[in-house]
Amino acid sequence: ALARGTSDIVVLLAPDLPPMVFGNMARDDGNLLVEPEDYPTIAADPIAAKYLRPFVGARQLLHNEPRWCLWLVDLDPSDIARSPLLKARLDAVRQFRAASKAPSTRQMAETPHLFGQRSQPDTPYVCVPRHASETRKFFPTALFGPEVICGDANFKADDPDGLAFAVISSSAFVTWQKAVGGRIKSDLRFSNTLTWNTFPLPALAADQRAAIIVGGKAVLEARAAHPERSLADHYNPLAMAPELLRAHRQLDTAVDKALGLRGSVTEAARLRALFTAYEQLTTADELALPT
């Protein structure tokens, strides 16, 4: 790995960025997840409906396709007896996990009401798809509140002020992603270890941080002008809205300045600045390590 870390601690090169982790893994055989065709039935159950939450998998993130889940971290155990529907689903989760060949999954059978692995924050967070088309000019991401449950087909990072969203939405980040990130066929493959932990954003002065956050908010406001559009629509390389492109240019100006770039910046210039920053950050990290 390019970023420094141990088996227990991962160190991001960029001191201002939060850790990026996988979303919540259900390991439920589909019983904690709620598909559109099942939603009316569960929503009509006054007990089960209390625990319905919007759920964002990969397709939901990019294409706005509806999906929900039963999020039961605050489950009242007596509600199971009051809802045959809820009881049937939890019984099915328990049986599925108990029959697994994996010891870790069998252990999860002891808590069938909970997602197998949980990372849901209690703050707004940035949600990042594992894969994105190489044809898109920017890496498509979104901000959600904690009431929206992020699935493990995506990555997430706590992002109360929107800095991480802004950085990953910049041309500098997608340039870094294309240079050092992996691929699935021709698609870009996001990695928290390979592309996020290594992203060489220098320490930000207060005004630089504020300008980047403002640029990210401009991107969100431009998207909000067309709420009917999915991320895939917004970032169709043949049909990006002029106001969204202007917002990204504002954001790029702020991120580029943090990298020491001014004026009209080419992709090659960004890449040179990124590798220069990477060298400086890793050299400083080496000097700070005890001998």
Image (spheres, grey):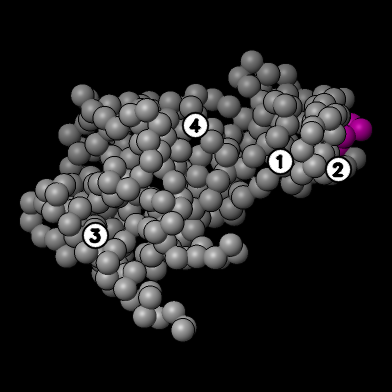
The structure residue drawn at horizontal position 42% and vertical position 61%, both measured from the top left corner, is 3
Residue closer to the observer: 236 or 279: 279
Q: Is residue 101 visible?
A: yes
Quadrant where the image shows the N terminus: bottom left
Tell me which amino acid carries mark 2. Glu
Dot 2: what SS?
Answer: loop
Sequence-first disc among 4 and 3: 4
Sequence-first disc among 4 and 2: 4
Mark 3 = which residue? 275
Mark 1 = which residue? 115
Mark 2 = which residue? 110
| Image mark for residue 259 | none
The stretch in magenta equals 79-83
Residue closer to the observer: 48 or 131: 131
CA–CA distance in space, label 1 to label 4: 17 Å
Point out residue 64 in the picture as x, y percentages from the top left corner: 46, 27
Q: Choose mark 4 or mark 3, whichever is in front.
A: 3
Mark 4 = which residue? 58
Tell me which amino acid carries mark 1. Phe
Task: Tell whether 122 sits left or right of 89.
Answer: left
Q: Quadrant of residue 256?
A: bottom left
Residue closer to the observer: 59 or 21: 21
Asked if labels 4 and 1 touch by Cβ distance under 8 angstroms, the answer is: no
